[in-house]
Amino acid sequence: MSSTSALRSLNINNINPHIREAKYAVRGELATRSEVYRARLAEGHSKSSQDKPLPFDKVISANIGNPQQLGQKPITFFRQVLSILEYPPLLENERALKEGFGYKQDVIDRAKWLLSEVQSVGAYSQSQGAPVIRRSIAQFLERRDGYSAEPENIFMSAGASAGVNTLLNIICAKPETGILVPIPQYPLYTATLAVLNARCVPYYLDESKAWGTDIGAIRESYKKAKSEGTDVRAIVVINPGNPTGASLSAGDVRSVLEFAAEERLVVLADEVYQTNVFIGKFTSFKKVLRDMQKEAPKKYENVELASLNSISKGMVGECGHRGGYFEFVGFDPEVAAQIYKIVSITLCAPVIGQCLVELMVNPPKEGDLSYPLYKQEYDDISQGLHKRALALFNAFKKMEGFECQEPQGSMYLFPTITIPKKAVEQAKKENRLPDEFYCFKVLDATGICVVPGSGFGQKEGTLHLRTTFLAPGTEWVGKLTKFHEAFMEEFRD
């Protein structure tokens, strides 16, 4: 017990125990240590410093999908519109905007239109989100999928994470509630379920099939959980995958929806990486569901689907502006009313983030004045991501003990790592898991922060790490390769 616990109301033993149990690997101890190193580098080392000089001159935060922290430039059109939304008096001198700062007329027109609808980005919107922005999202979904979308079925959120939190709060009615979650998974899901005192029902993705969804494994996990008294209510699918980078085929999506229909499960489709696809093409759960309902209306008419998207990923990368949305299909109107109530408690999603969502789903089109620059910036970011993904993938292929699937999408690689027994023994001595031990060694030697696979879940007897490929250049990849060679020599059996 804390030595000051008698002097305070709160101590570590009397706070919500579910908060204590929750784990969030991408912002865990490794990330905390990396920020300590970043602060030390920023301060420099005085002669009187007791700290040993660091063996690197910068920290590479490859632990989290935070594009602009790692050098991704904002889209010009988006930021120019936002600048006017944040400070409308700029419109008093449109000529200066155009001639002095290169603003195009379509930037000014879009800002005026948004201001006429939201009035001020400093004011609350409707709790569900500004109606005009939800209409833009509905139109985007109709263009993407070829099926109608209703603005009243769309809720704005402070990033997709807030949407996930809302939906899980609605679904998790009791401690026995279970949610099928892919393993490896983004730890948002297991952490949120821990806080809600609900059960994670893991189903393993198939690494031998490029981390594809194995419907047999899903059925097996479902049956096991049911036999143990778990009330399985929903299934989470992350497509493209985080941390695996896998991109699901339309057939895989259909299999999940068929299973959900059979077992009356809500489908939570995390689709925040839908524009980050290198192999094949993105297929939304909404489109496949509507196709299936067309083929067999009675069989699939009551499938409940919630699809999530965000401005944080893709070529937008505006994580700090906290914008996102979810669309639900097939939900009971009384449940929808309860969703409205829970989002009302937090009043509304950030309005500037909502406006960025509108820009994401309704960007400049061919023929618009801003389109050439928008297209160039978008393509440069996309091609740069793919190039860096391949550079990292090729490096992993050459590293002893590494096996890695070809990058298909999202922002991550999730290679298998095999490390020597001596390293495993040393990890035990330091009371760490082997992959965690390896990632700390990487950070301490190179300044590169990656996340151990144990933070995302992995099959027993396997080790992995997750890294983004967002950092510019290839110098850091060379550092990682050099470190690994030294590590393997140090601990070779």
Image (cartoon, rainbow, N blue to C red):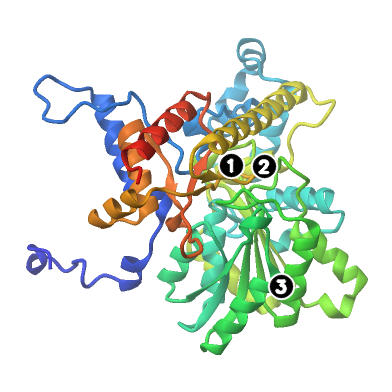
Q: In the picture, residue 213 is in which quadrant?
A: bottom right
Drawn side of residue 302 relative to residue 481, left or right = right
In the image, farthest residue toward the front: 493
Name the spot of residue 275 as percent of width and height, x first.
70, 43
Q: Residue at x 57, y 83 (%)?
A: 224
Q: Mark 1 and mark 3: span between their CA atoms?
A: 28 Å
Q: Residue at x 15, y 20 (%)?
A: 46
Q: Is residue 436 above or below residue 177?
A: above
Q: Mark 2 and mark 3: span between their CA atoms?
A: 26 Å
Q: Mark 2 touching mark 3, by CB under 8 A?
A: no
Query: Label 2 neighbourhood size at 10 Å, few (<14), some (14-19), many (20+)?
Result: many
Q: Mark 1 and mark 2: span between their CA atoms?
A: 7 Å
Q: Which mark is drawn over residue 304?
A: 3
Element marked by disc 1: loop
In the image, farthest residue toward the right: 295
Element marked by disc 3: loop
Residue on which disc 1 sits? 411
Name the spot of residue 262 as percent of width and height, x first.
75, 81
Lower sequence index among marks 2 and 3: 2
Quick check: can you spot residue 410? yes
Q: Mark 1 touching mark 2, by CB under 8 A?
A: yes
Residue on which disc 2 sits? 276
Under mark 2, the amino acid is: Asn
Name the spot of residue 51 as percent of width and height, x first.
15, 31
Name the spot of residue 162 as percent of width and height, x first.
52, 58
Q: In the picture, residue 55 is in which quadrant?
A: top left
Lower sequence index among marks 1 and 2: 2
Under mark 3, the amino acid is: Glu
Query: Label 3 neighbourhood size at 10 Å, few (<14), some (14-19), many (20+)?
Result: many
**464 or 353: nearer the eye?**
464
